[in-house]
């Protein structure tokens, strides 16, 4: 008899009833089918017990034909288990489960999954219960085993609560009326799936008759909501969100018959209702990987934000068991393997197309935009921190370390501009061919815009928006610079200079409503050529120089880290006086951010959550240290040039070290 072993966590007694089924093409269902719940609305009265499992497998195709491959699923993992359990499923020659043995172990066990090999495990939350702690479905594909079963365990008496809403923990202080309204609006924006909270909608304006995809749960939009709930003491919704979005990873979606890379996270998902035979209905999770988005661009930043949010969950709640789970470990690896895959690009920065991040329309950021590099750097540091290091992950950890070293040097050395660097570029020689060239990217001095020479302060500097051969995007992108400070992608000296620049150019970057997404705006022919005459991205509107209140929480984090908390208080106070009156608008227009955006949604959730997160951090600045990274001096010793066999004659690592304040 063949046997399979699964390791999970349990303080409760799972019953040992297994359901057997053969995996087949018809069983797997259509590749475009959304993730389905196994609970119908007609069974709500019996929510204490799960309905029979309906298992939809949202994964990439099975391994190549020739292997007799089947899938085994078992709900032996529970989110709130404290001790691991091992379940063995044995079958006889007729393919019938003949014996089940459940062994309780008292020590913690970490399971290492095999990624990018023929054998690997995948674990999903099985939504057969409205309770807060849902069992998981373990999917194992093993080319070495002739497995013919689909195994499911029915829950016993789990004694789990069925939440009717989000219980908000008292902050221990008297809240202002504005904060009370904001918390109520955030709670009203919560989306539930099978009775459990799984995220917040992008906007919740009752007067909006054409919400488009603003009624969906976006990964990037949910980050400030997640932090607000976590800092408030409510971790359940964040845990559920992390697990459900993990279920949707690498869904078989296509754009013009092309499948995304394994590990891609969706930009958003929505909870829909599917009508079954008769009058029964069931809830489904329907993800969007960009195939429905305006521009049809896949989100590069979703997986990076997911990893960052996972780390924040562990740091704030102290619950590190989530990131240690085998399915979550596999999810981290899939995201990072997708980002670290070899390609034609020779730079350590991540090559992406326009519209793949917060700026999700054509704005001339294709190439190596700073925002993605800062998030990529953060996700790499999170991965190195959370991954279990063993024989199965040591190669990935080594690749992470090498990439971190190269990426930090590349951004600090080549993206940084201040008065000294601009003067250096102004005197660049071009057409240099050698390993010792100063102008490595063949930048022509005429690219320096006239506005920059008079704009940048003597004591300030910033990281430019993009760098490619013969191209430097000198625009100031706020999120990329703030996140570089938060993640320590920029050096301590550079962090100070970035905050100096924001303070010195307060009217330009902050104005009447914090904060400009980028400065300056594209105008005239630049706007027509670069944006394609985008009517939503007209000068000083939306992504083209618009002001976004959601950036407050990143600004607050950066200010606390650099000891400039008074700047954050000033910005939050300025926003607080207007946000309620303006009904929590999505963004603001004009050079100084005076007017609500001409197409801005009202009651925008990440505007509300960004404000609340900023307020909590300002009241508890010690909690901010859980969300940012300090300088990692070990990275400075990992010189990638020394690992190369290309015979480089010169390494600029010393120049990077000179920027560090020890």
Image (cartoon, helix red, strand yellow):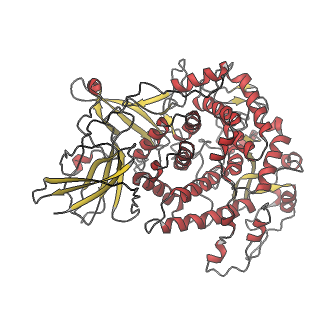
**Residue 85: % across, % down:** 31, 52
In screen coordinates, is 52 left or right of 360? left
Q: Quadrant of residue 278?
A: top left
Kindly tell me whether residue 73 is visible in this rendering: yes
Along the line of sight, the residue nearer the viewer: 21 or 101: 101
**Residue 424 is drawn in which quadrant?**
bottom right
Left or right of 226 on screen, residue 191: left
Q: Residue at x 75, y 62 (%)?
A: 413
Considering every residue shown, the one lying at the far left of the view is 94
Q: Is residue 612 above or below residue 646?
A: above
Residue 420: x and y in percent read 87, 59
Q: Tag count in the figure?
A: 0
Image quadrant holding the C terminus, namely: bottom right
| Residue 116 horizontal side relative to residue 40, left or right | right
Foreground: 200 or 368? 200
Whole-percent x, y for residue 495 in the image: 77, 51
* Position of residue 422 measured from the top left corner of the image (x, y, whole percent): 84, 57
Q: Is residue 61 above or below residue 178?
A: below
Q: Is residue 176 above or below residue 338?
A: above
Front residue (pair 293, 389): 389
Residue 61 visible, this angle? no
The answer to whether 64 appears left or right of 367 in the picture is left
The quadrant holding residue 563 is: top right
**Location of the N terminus (image quadrant):** bottom left
């Amino acid at each position: 008899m063949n046997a399979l072993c699964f390791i999970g966590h349990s303080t409760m007694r799972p019953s040992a009833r297994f359901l057997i089924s053969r995996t087949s093409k018809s069983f797997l269902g259509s590749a475009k089918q959304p993730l389905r719940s196994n609970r119908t609305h007609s069974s709500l009265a019996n929510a204490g017990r799960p309905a029979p499992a309906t298992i939809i497998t949202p994964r990439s195709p099975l391994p190549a034909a020739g292997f007799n491959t089947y899938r085994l699923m078992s709900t032996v993992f529970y989110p709130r288990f404290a001790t691991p359990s091992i379940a063995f499923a044995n079958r006889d020659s007729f393919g019938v489960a003949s014996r089940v043995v459940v062994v309780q172990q008292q020590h913690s066990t970490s399971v290492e999954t095999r990624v990018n090999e023929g054998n690997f495990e995948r674990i999903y939350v099985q939504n057969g219960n409205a309770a807060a702690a849902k069992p998981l479905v373990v999917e194992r594909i093993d080319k070495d085993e002739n497995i013919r079963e689909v195994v499911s365990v029915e829950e016993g008496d789990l004694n789990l609560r069925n939440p009717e809403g989000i219980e908000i923990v008292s902050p221990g202080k008297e809240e202002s009326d504005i904060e009370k309204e904001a918390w109520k609006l955030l709670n009203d924006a919560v989306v539930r799936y099978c009775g459990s909270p799984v995220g917040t909608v992008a906007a919740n304006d009752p007067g909006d008759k054409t919400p488009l995809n603003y009624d969906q749960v976006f990964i990037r939009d949910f980050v400030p909501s997640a932090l607000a709930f976590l800092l408030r003491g409510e971790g359940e919704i964040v845990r559920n969100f992390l697990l459900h979005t993990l279920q949707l990873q690498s869904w078989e979606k296509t754009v013009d018959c092309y499948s995304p890379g394994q590990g891609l996270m969706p930009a958003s998902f929505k909870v829909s209702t599917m009508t079954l035979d008769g009058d029964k209905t069931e809830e489904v999770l329907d993800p969007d990987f960009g195939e429905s988005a305006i521009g049809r661009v896949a989100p590069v930043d979703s997986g990076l934000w997911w990893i960052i949010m996972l780390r924040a969950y562990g740091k704030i709640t102290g619950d590190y068991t989530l990131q240690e789970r085998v399915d979550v470990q596999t999810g981290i690896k899939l995201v990072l393997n997708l980002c670290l895959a070899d390609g034609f690009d020779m730079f350590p920065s991540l090559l992406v197309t326009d519209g793949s991040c917060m700026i999700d329309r054509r704005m001339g950021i294709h190439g190596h935009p700073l925002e993605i590099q800062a998030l990529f750097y953060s996700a790499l540091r999170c991965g190195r921190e959370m991954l279990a290091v063993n024989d199965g992950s040591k190669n990935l950890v080594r690749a992470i370390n090498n990439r971190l070293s190269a990426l930090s040097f590349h951004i600090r050395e080549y993206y940084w501009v201040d008065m000294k660097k601009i003067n250096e570029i102004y005197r660049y020689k071009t057409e240099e061919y050698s390993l010792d060239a100063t102008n490595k990217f063949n930048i022509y001095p005429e690219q320096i815009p006239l506005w920059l020479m008079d704009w940048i302060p003597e004591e300030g500097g910033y990281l430019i928006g993009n760098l490619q051969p013969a191209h430097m995007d000198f625009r100031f992108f706020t999120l990329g610079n703030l996140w570089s400070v938060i993640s320590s992608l920029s050096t301590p000296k550079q962090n100070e200079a970035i905050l100096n620049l924001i303070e010195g150019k307060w009217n330009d970057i902050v104005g009447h409503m914090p904060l400009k997404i980028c400065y300056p705006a594209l105008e005239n022919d630049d706007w027509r050529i670069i944006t394609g005459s985008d009517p939503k991205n007209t000068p000083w509107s939306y992504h083209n120089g618009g002001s976004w209140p959601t950036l407050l929480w990143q600004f607050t984090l950066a200010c606390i880290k650099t000891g400039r908390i008074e700047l954050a208080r000033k910005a939050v106070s300025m926003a607080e006086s207007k946000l309620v009156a303006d009904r929590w608008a999505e963004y603001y227009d004009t050079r100084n951010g005076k007017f609500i955006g001409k197409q801005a949604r009202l009651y925008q959730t990440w505007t509300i959550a960004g404000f609340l997160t900023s307020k909590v951090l300002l009241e508890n600045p010690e909690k901010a240290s859980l969300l940012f990274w300090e300088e990692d001096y070990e990275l400075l010793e990992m010189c990638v040039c020394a690992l190369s066999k290309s015979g480089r004659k010169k390494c600029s690592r010393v120049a990077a070290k000179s920027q560090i304040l020890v």
